[in-house]
Image (tube, rainbow, N blue to C red):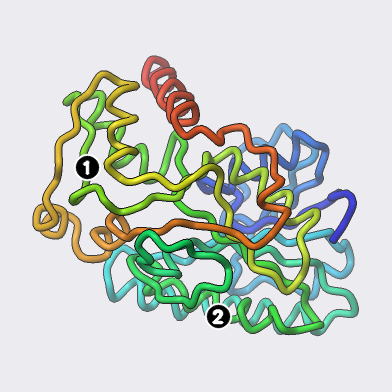
Amino acid sequence: MADELKSVFLLGGSGYLGSAVVRKLVETGVRVRMLVHTSEGENRNPLIEKIPGSIATFDWKSLQHDLPDAIIHMARISGRTRTSRLIAGFRGYHANRRMIRQLASIPVSPRVIFTSGTLVYGSCGPEPADEGTPLNPVGFQRYYVKAEYPFLGALRSDKVPVSIVRPPWIYGPGSWFRQFYYPSIIKSGVVPQFGNGANLMSLIHVDDCAALIKEVATMGVAGTVYNLYTGSAITNESFCRILAEITGSKVVIIPDEVLLRKYGKTVYESFTFSLNSMSRHKLIHDFPAVYVDHRSGLRQVLAHLDQMELRG
């Protein structure tokens, strides 16, 4: 735990959530070093330093010469097919195990905040799922949860201070929302409802999620898992109806068999699992989220996407 965050070493900083975390850090004066595949492109912010490299080969012991306050890990080795996802999970496991071992060998290890997701809990129906809920991964996490194992083991270690954050559905002007919902809304005036809509969705706006990750990096306790969310879980049907009301669209139900045939089992499980995310921790309960009301958050995201469309 720290009263102030001055420097962070960031993995996955160019991604959907990672970019939002970078913005949250630099706007409060935090120095950010980003491990990136390539450092090409102009960097105009003096608080950001891009370091070319890979999580699989980076020399983590080198950090002791310029020790950051925290390492925020949002990088994931991913795949497009079942086989490539299995391979990616094992590659992630070995890269992260190597990282933990190297950090444990230096005199003082930075705190590590590893970003996972609530798909690791599986479908829990209406029952609240907190940080003590047993893991039963579904969807993409069937493959990628292996990369989390080294950090789960390190939670009980006194050599590397580790916290794990598990966001739910992160909505914003990108990722799954832009791929599966926005094009259908603007092109066809249709909000697709995948399945019967009874499954619960815990949600968090990407900006609130980024701010909460920064909060855990600053005030979080090592050896702790944090479920990140804001507001109450809503059904998938309610989520779709909110989108329809905001955009003047109509909800069209996509039957299970169509979703399975078009996208496969992994996407099907990810879109139909039911989770009511909760937390045991005061840090999460007391967080001053901007978008506790998902209607206002979705309205902001849709307006942002509309502006992006106008800019071409």
Q: How many other residues sit within 10 Å of disc 2, few (<14), some (14-19) or many (≥20)?
A: some
Q: Residue lying furthest top in this view?
A: 310
Residue 19 x %, y %: 59, 43
**Residue at screen point 10% across, 53% down:** 258
Residue drawn where x is 23% and y is 33% of the image: 191
Using the numbered discs, state the Cα–Cα distance from disc 2 to disc 1 in whole angstroms: 34 Å
Q: Position of residue 74 (x, y in %)?
A: 58, 58
Residue sitting at 35 percent across and 66 percent down? 123
- Quarter assignment of residue 186: top left
Disc 1 residue type? Gln
Q: Residue 161 vs residue 144: left or right?
A: right
- Image coordinates for residue 145, horizontal then vertical, percent: 46, 74
Query: Which residue is identified by label 2?
Result: 149
Residue occupied by mark 1: 193
Q: Nearer the viewer, residue 166 or 305?
A: 166
Check disc 1: other Cα within 10 Å, few if <14, some if 14-19, many if 20+. Answer: many
Quadrant (top left/top right/bottom left/bottom right) for the N terminus: bottom right
Q: Are the residues at dot 2 and dot 1 in contact (C-beta closer than 8 Å)?
A: no
Image quarter (top left, top right, bottom left or bottom right) of the C terminus: top left
**Which residue is pictured at 15% across the width and 42% down the height?**
253
Numbered circles on residues, count: 2
Of helix, strand and loop, which one carries label 1? strand
